[in-house]
Every structure is written in C-alpha cells, then in structure tokens.
Image (tube, rainbow, N blue to C red):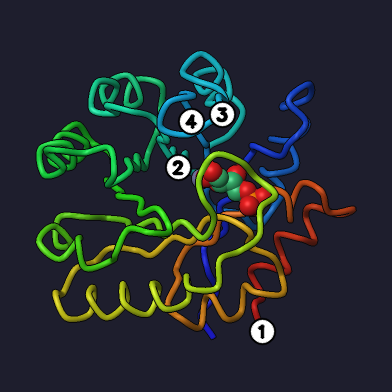
Amino acid sequence: MKRPIIAPSILSADFSDLTKTFKLLNESEAEWIHLDIMDGNFVPNISFGMPIIKSLRKLTDKVFDAHLMIEQPERYIHNFKLIGVDVLTVHYETQIHLNRTVELIKKIGMKAGVALNPHTPVNLLKDIINELDLVLIMSVNPGFSGQKFIENTYNKIVEAKSLIARSGSKALIQVDGGVTEQNAPKIVDSGADVLVAASYIFHHDNPLQAIRNLKKTQ
Ligand code: DX5
Ligand code: ZN
C-alpha cells in the first residue's frame, strides 16, 4: 500500500515549547506541518495567526500547510505567502468567488487547497477540480482537535478519488480530524494521500513512533 504524506497539526502541541515540538517534527518522517488558523467566526474557536507562523518558519524547512478556518480568507492570501506558507487551503463554505481565490493563491506561488465540511458534498468541486492542488476532506466538524472521526468520510474520499481520476486532476486528497493508527489504513485505502493528525500524535507517549505508525498504515 502507498505511504501517505503525514501532516502533524500543531494544534495539540505544547504551545509553551514550540521549539521542542519543531525539533521533534524535524527528526520525524512527517513531510508537512499543518497549521490550523481559526477566527472565532467561521468556527467557534480562535487559534493563532501570522506572527506565530512567521516565527515558526525559522524552525523548519518542512512544507507549511495552512488550513484557513476563517471568513473571507481571500483578504489574507498575500500575507500567508509572505510569511512562508507553501500550501494554502480555504473552506468551500466561505467562498463566493472560489475560482478567483484559487487563481490568486497559485499565481503568487503557493499550492491551492479547498476544504469541505462534513456536510458539503464532494461533487460541488466538479467544475474546479482541475485547478486544485489539494482537496481537504474534513472528517470532524472544524474548530477543535480531539474529536471523533465521522464514518461517512470514507465514502467522500472514494468520491473525491473518482472525481480526480475522471477529470485528470492532479489534486491530492487530505483527510483531517480524528485520524489515528486504527483508521489510517482504511483512510489511505479509500484514496487519501495526506493524513493530518493532532491529538493522536501529540498525546502519544512517543510522537515520533505515532508518526511512523500513521505512515506505515498496513
Ligand atoms: C480541526 C482541525 C484539525 C485538528 C485535528 O478543526 O482542522 O486539523 O487539529 O485534530 P485531531 O487530529 O485531534 O482530530
Ligand atoms: Zn486542519
């Protein structure tokens, strides 16, 4: 079975010692680092923003994968590029002019992702799938780490995989929320390319081993 890209979300890390967290991530098999940005409007929680990301950029060369859970994310696209974000994902539910937003993200040199809430159907991406670098399928309701994986996600991953295959799109499928070593094999088997995990990794006795467990999948 193919080995997924692992994108640890630092949302469950110890924010009083992020230098230590990044030292660990640099030693790990994780290729990406997932940054969950929340504004207290689109989701009922507030996380962290640009100054923190800018500082963290000095601590690693790994891919910065920013998941924007904010209203009107298009207002900040240039800012995220300036502070070193590589993959920028906006939520489908926040967009009126999704095509324009995706075009801008790519034009200024980032990869463009679109995230779907658990209730948002995959087929809504039909007319933009060829423009996307990433489809983020939320497997929990966004806003918090430590929630339970929603089982219907497997169907959505299969649908996304089929949409991508039919259209010839090169988009990767990312799954975010409630990912553990128990469900990772089935998630990858369904078609996921990138696994995000926060609590499974950072609440594990051995986060490096937790990352290896997710990579192994079978
Ligand atoms: C949830 C975030 C996730 C979250 C995942 O809104 O988008 O990235 O950090 O946390 P776990 O892996 O604990 O479900
Ligand atoms: Zn996320």
Pointer 2 or 3: first along the chain: 3
Residue 114 placement (x, y as % from top left): 30, 50
Quadrant of the rendered image containing residue 25: top right
Kind of residue sitting beneath label 4: Ile
Q: Residues within 10 Å of mark 2 (few under 14, many from 20)?
A: many
In the rendered image of this protein, does residue 104 appear above or below residue 162?
above
**Contact flag, marks 1 and 2 (Cβ < 8 Å):** no
Which residue is tagged 3?
45
Circle nearer the N terminus (1, 2):
2
Please give left or right for residue 200 compared with residue 61 in the image: right
- Whether residue 178 sits left or right of residue 126 in the image: it is right
Q: Residue at x 32, y 56 (%)?
A: 134
Kind of residue at badge 2: Asp
Residue 60 % position (x, y): 58, 34
Which residue in the protein does label 1 denote?
A: 218
- Amino acid on which disc 3 is placed: Asn
Q: Secondary structure at mark 2?
A: strand
Which of the two residues, 183 or 30, is positioned nearer the viewer here?
A: 183
Point out the image quarter for the C terminus.
Answer: bottom right
Q: Position of residue 106 (x, y in %)?
A: 19, 40
* Dot in front, 3 or 1: 3
Instruction: Decide which of tag 4 and tag 3 comes sooner along the chain.
Output: 4
Quarter holding residue 70: top left
Name the residue tied to disc 2.
65
CA separation in Å, label 1 and label 2: 25 Å
